[in-house]
Image: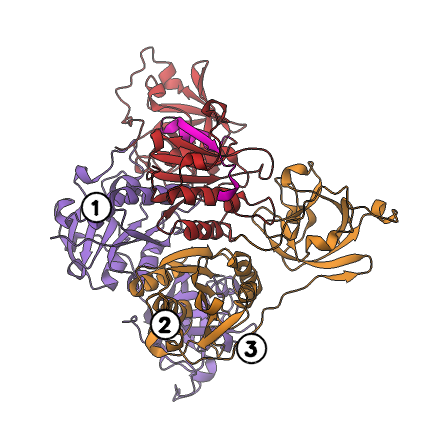
Chain colours: A purple, B red, C orange
């Protein structure tokens, strides 16, 4: 007996200027009128599978159980597979192109327990052209799952080990410091790094940041935005538990000239370097628990 | 007995920075709390009735049965009529100003079967000023229809033949070619033309594009984005069944310097012209069925 | 017995490019799946408490009874209090930071009847970092209220007189004229002033506008956009009952070089000044009723 899901969480790079998002929701409404659709974001940069995958992964642990519909799909119309990936033994199903977009979120919630290719024509819409699989393939599959269609009715089961992985840059030690990458710049200009605050345990209150050709900047570790003085660069633990470069009420990304994907090196500040036993007692940072709410 | 509609599909040029869309939905919620509102788009360029009408027409065949609420209304407060247009003998009702905005969508779904002017004061909100009919006239009408008020209670019936038509440019033969117009540039920079792919049946794989003062470009007909090489201009059948100028993962509109409403001339490419019996067998285009899913 | 609210009206400065809004809605969905969320706007300029407060106040009288969730919160993580403010003896509850954001809306609907600080940990999510109270504090509170939790279970009652007021600029007489402020520039470039049209009763058809270093402009009072000639500046009563500077189908704010918060002085035009008994009979303005629909 298939679960009758109640919620579809929807992410895409469709933007909201065109009718794409509305049409997808209309298709869902016709098939599964009881399902609520929650927009995660539709302003993923066009064709940016990496950014879409990270956005979905950040949201993943908070999403309502049900169906996740994600479409950032530069290969639409090619032989890349449209897939549905079950997680949590059926608690949720992620639907989208098999191009790495879904992989970080799938990993975040414990990995795939089953997957199918969306090959069954009965659960697609006839398409005037092959460029809008969100409407013609993915939305109908999401809606039919909500309406009670079983996962394996959507198409043949595929090996979850053969799903395309996401490319996630890991930070690594480099000399005395950490070679990191900007994962994400949010609306406020905060620059999230792929750095676990625990990796900064031996650092003092100040951390040196080297990014691109810009000057070396000194960041002060702090607990919250308002702890950072005017003009000062801060390094806080963000709401996802990662080290993040911030300014108070201004854009750190603009100030430092950095964007998503850029390399940033973190080094202990000189004054700490001169101290043979760098202390962590003085740091005002309260390191957050990685992982989410229960 | 009036139908109790369940869905309101909503399009406007209100944008989402101001509270306009939220206020319209709040007005609907107070009158018809059971109705779901699906946003088609609120980023129609300000006052652009043509663009709004085309957006609504593209979406029309996919919309859930019910009420369509559309507001792009530069004449708000004047004597242009606020109207409700029934289609499909009551399956759906389109509500908005009678300024041509609704006409393309009405035509797309088979034409008006009845119409009324929204004159009944009992189904309006009292208005502090005459500039927000979306809130004061159109939203209440849409919501009251969902709550079970009959169409002809909203105001006097009017002649559907007297409704203001939309202005839709048709492509036409011009010399050896086709004089066309860009109907729409989507978020990805794809430029949809008012050209049925069937009209290109006698063309070869390459089509010459002349637009504005720019150089003549050669476009290759293809099935999907990924079939188009780097730097190459493609001509595909888009998801609505129309010929569309595209690049792979880049904006064709930017590359060619064209926008909505611009004229584009399509001509058979020289190599085809030299061929006395231009063949269509070699074309990789699979022409889509015009018309929508069932 | 607590009210089981059905609707959450949601405003923030989160933007829609990131997943913030979607995550807040997902948190709500998990706690109160029956609640409908209506977006007022999420494009309040980042950290702009004044603009957010005005947007909420404009929307307030139209919002469905229930919960209002508003987050523009530059002091997140500091000791500014998270609060829930009851209005209308429980008809609605406004939730957000106590930084003046909620105050104009609370005043607009008759003032606070009760308030609590959101201190109860049982109704918060555990937070990896202290920077996303929308997700971790405010959304859970809003959802639990909808699910039937009583207001005073969310935390200790606080004195409503101690809530932080909003800063609202009032217009004032200045010489022969009125010293006013631009409250808001909407998507269409209309510039709403903090001026009651009644205060212009003694003015003639023309009003002189002085703004910044720009030239003095003459505005014609009119009822609606279409009454204003090409190139002419108009002064109308907007949909909230306030005097507003407009152009027909163009941006008045761009034309006059003014933005929200800018000072504008209104003076009777010279021809009226020369008239010892300025007449109001000739004015085409029909002054709207201030106040909202019933």
Q: Residue at x 58, y 46 (%)?
A: C188
Residue A38 locus on image (x, y percent): 34, 54
Quarter-of-image position of residue B80: top right
Quarter-of-image position of residue B189: top left
Q: Chain of mark 1?
A: A
Q: CA distance from mark 2 to mark 1?
A: 47 Å
Within-10-Å neighbours for mark 1: few <14, some 14–19, many 20+ = many
Residue A75 locus on image (x, y percent): 29, 42
Say yes or no: labels 2 and 1 on the same chain.
yes
Q: Is residue B112 magenta?
A: yes
Which residue bears the numbered disc 2? A178
Say yes or no: labels 1 and 3 on the same chain.
no
Residue C211 visible (yes or no): no
Secondary structure at badge 2 equals: strand
Secondary structure at badge 1 equals: helix
* Region in magenta: B100-123
Disc 2 versus disc 1: nearer the observer: 1
Q: Is residue B60 left or right of residue B73?
A: left
Q: CA distance from mark 2 to mark 3?
A: 51 Å
Q: Is residue B9 magenta?
A: no
Residue A140 locus on image (x, y percent): 24, 43
Say yes or no: labels 2 and 3 on the same chain.
no
Q: Residue at x 43, y 55 (%)?
A: C39
Badge 2 or badge 1: first in the primary sequence: 1
What number is the disc on residue C161? 3
Q: Chain of mark 3?
A: C
């Amino acid at each position: 007996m298939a679960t009758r899901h109640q919620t579809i969480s929807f992410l895409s790079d469709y933007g909201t200027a065109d009718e794409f998002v509305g049409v997808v929701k209309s298709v869902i409404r016709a098939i599964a009128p009881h399902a609520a659709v929650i927009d995660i974001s539709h302003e993923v940069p066009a064709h940016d599978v990496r950014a879409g995958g990270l956005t979905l992964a950040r949201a993943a642990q908070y999403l309502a159980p049900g169906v996740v519909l994600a479409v950032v799909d530069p290969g639409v119309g090619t032989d890349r597979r449209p897939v549905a990936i079950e997680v949590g033994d059926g608690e949720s199903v992620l639907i989208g192109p098999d191009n790495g977009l879904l992989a970080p979120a799938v990993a975040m919630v414990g990995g795939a327990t089953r997957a199918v290719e969306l090959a069954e024509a009965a659960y697609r819409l006839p398409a005037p052209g092959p460029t809008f699989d969100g409407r013609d393939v993915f939305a109908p599959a999401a809606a039919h799952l909500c309406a009670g269609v079983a996962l394996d009715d959507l198409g043949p089961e595929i090996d979850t080990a053969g799903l395309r992985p996401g490319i996630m840059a890991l930070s690594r030690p480099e000399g005395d410091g950490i070679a990191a990458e900007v994962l994400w710049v949010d609306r406020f200009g905060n620059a999230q790094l792929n750095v676990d605050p625990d990796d900064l345990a031996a650092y003092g209150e100040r951390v040196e940041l080297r990014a691109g050709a810009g000057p070396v900047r000194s960041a002060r570790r702090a607990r919250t935005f308002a702890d950072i003085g005017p003009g000062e660069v801060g390094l806080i633990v963000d709401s996802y538990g990662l080290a993040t470069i911030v300014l108070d009420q201004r854009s750190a990304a603009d100030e430092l000239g950095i964007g998503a994907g850029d390399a940033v090196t973190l080094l202990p500040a000189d004054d700490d370097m001169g101290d043979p036993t760098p202390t962590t007692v003085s740091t005002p940072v309260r390191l957050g628990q990685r992982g989410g709410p229960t």
